[in-house]
Image (cartoon, rainbow, N blue to C red):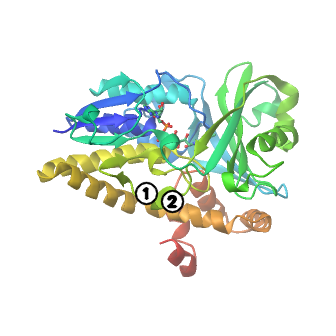
Amino acid sequence: MACIAIVGAGPSGAAAGRHLARRGHAVTLIDRARFPRDKTCGDWLTPIALAELAQLGLDEPALEARVPGHALVQRTTLVSPDGRRSEQRSTRPGRCIRREHLDALVLAQALHAGCTIQQRSVRRIDRRDAEWDGYDLLIDARGAGSARANAVGLRTYWTVRRHPDTEALADEVGLHTDATHRRGYGWVFPVEVDEQMLTFNIGVGLWQRDSQPGATVHDYLARFLEQNPVTRRLAPHRLGETRRQGYPVVLGGWHQDVVDDGVLRIGDAAGLADPLTGDGIGNALTSGRLVAEAIDRACAEGRDLAGAAARLWRRRHAEHLAPELRRALLLRHLLVSTTAKNLATAALDRGPAGWRERLHGAVFGSAGYGALWSRASPAIRALAP
Ligand SMILES: Cc1cc2nc3c(=O)[nH]c(=O)nc-3n(C[C@H](O)[C@H](O)[C@H](O)COP(=O)(O)OP(=O)(O)OC[C@H]3O[C@@H](n4cnc5c(N)ncnc54)[C@H](O)[C@@H]3O)c2cc1C
């Protein structure tokens, strides 16, 4: 049994805590926030993220019982800069749950498994500091703030009246690209559905290097809310809008070392958000599970626990997470120009249905990029094996 401190009790830290505690390890979670706390996010849970939640004791019936009224997503839509839409009915539905609720649920599962929690802010995680005496292993799960962020997201919530125009969007997640923001996109995701009202999470994400005068993330969101055909459809029924909130994202950081001076990094702190879409909850949860497996195995080896845990976590990251992140990054490079996005969306509509299903499955996280890659040409596969 090992004694482990995890700094950050978001999805990655709490998932790691739960998996470790259930294996009999002594886990202290440390977070500066008091839960339930909000986290700026699109709130979209891919089917892959839902499968990880089920392994934490939060299967779909449990989510329905514990967060009534959250949105079940049956359709995915990609919109190109020329306004063309590619729609796909999901073979595996996803869900949208406000992070305030989701993260509190995951943390509760960790505490239920035996983790303890301290509410305090940690200045630095350095094994040499006396603060960490008594712990065998340290995990950094502090999110994007502890890594080098290269993108930023900004979102708001719109509550709208039920009406045929708004109800038609209540089970659909849509990603909208445009000609100005090369690597960015806007999203409209339903989060809450009740008898009278619907709530949508609407936001934009932007790589920092695409930001320029007139194209900052605030300009982008303002334009998206005013001019996008979907937001224009919602606008006449709007009852309220929340404050616009931003947060950094680390995209495409798969090449970073996931061990820093003996500290194991997971989730956004390891740069694991998808570099094409910015989705990171699924990989945060997966990294929590994989790091727990690595630590457990290292304990079984019986010597040099820190060295073995670092080696085994690096190996699991390289085998299970890095290939998918590399493929997403390559796809993003291929789809950076307006022409490429327009052509790709047109081809999806005209091409075989299998391709559309696989691309939607990769982008919206029901099958991962591997299924798409298995059908790609050998030249593309060689670029991101
Ligand atoms: C605008 C936006 C939209 C997004 N939309 C989606 C989406 O729709 N779907 C999706 O899958 N992903 C989305 N993501 C990404 C997703 O939010 C992250 O990948 C996910 O939150 C990563 O989880 P984590 O546990 O690694 O980090 P976090 O969720 O950030 O948790 C980190 C925790 O560490 C704590 N902490 C930080 N610093 C300290 C410190 N010094 N001391 C103590 N505690 C500390 C924080 O309080 C926090 O609780 C989005 C991101 C942004 C910014």
Residue identified by numbered label 1: 321
**Can I make out residue 354 in this image?**
no
Please name the residue shown 51% across and 64% down the image: 326
Please name the residue shown 46% across and 64% down the image: 323
250 up-or-down from 118: above or below: below
Image mark count? 2
Amino acid type of the residue that numbered disc 2 sits on in the rendered structure: Leu
Q: In this rendered view, identify the residue nearer to me: 23 or 214.
A: 214
270 up-or-down from 352: above or below: above
Judged from this view, the residue extending furthest toward the left is 302
Discs 1, 2 touching: Cβ within 8 Å: yes
Judged from this view, the residue extending furthest toward the top is 196
Q: Is mark 1 within 8 Å of ligand 1?
A: no
Q: In this rendered view, identify the residue nearer to me: 270 or 17.
A: 270
Residue identified by numbered label 2: 325
- Secondary structure under tag 2 reads helix
What is the CA distance from the residue labelled 1 to the residue labelled 2?
6 Å
Q: On the rendered structure, is 267 left or right of 109?
A: right
**Residue 172 percent across, percent down from the top left:** 69, 41
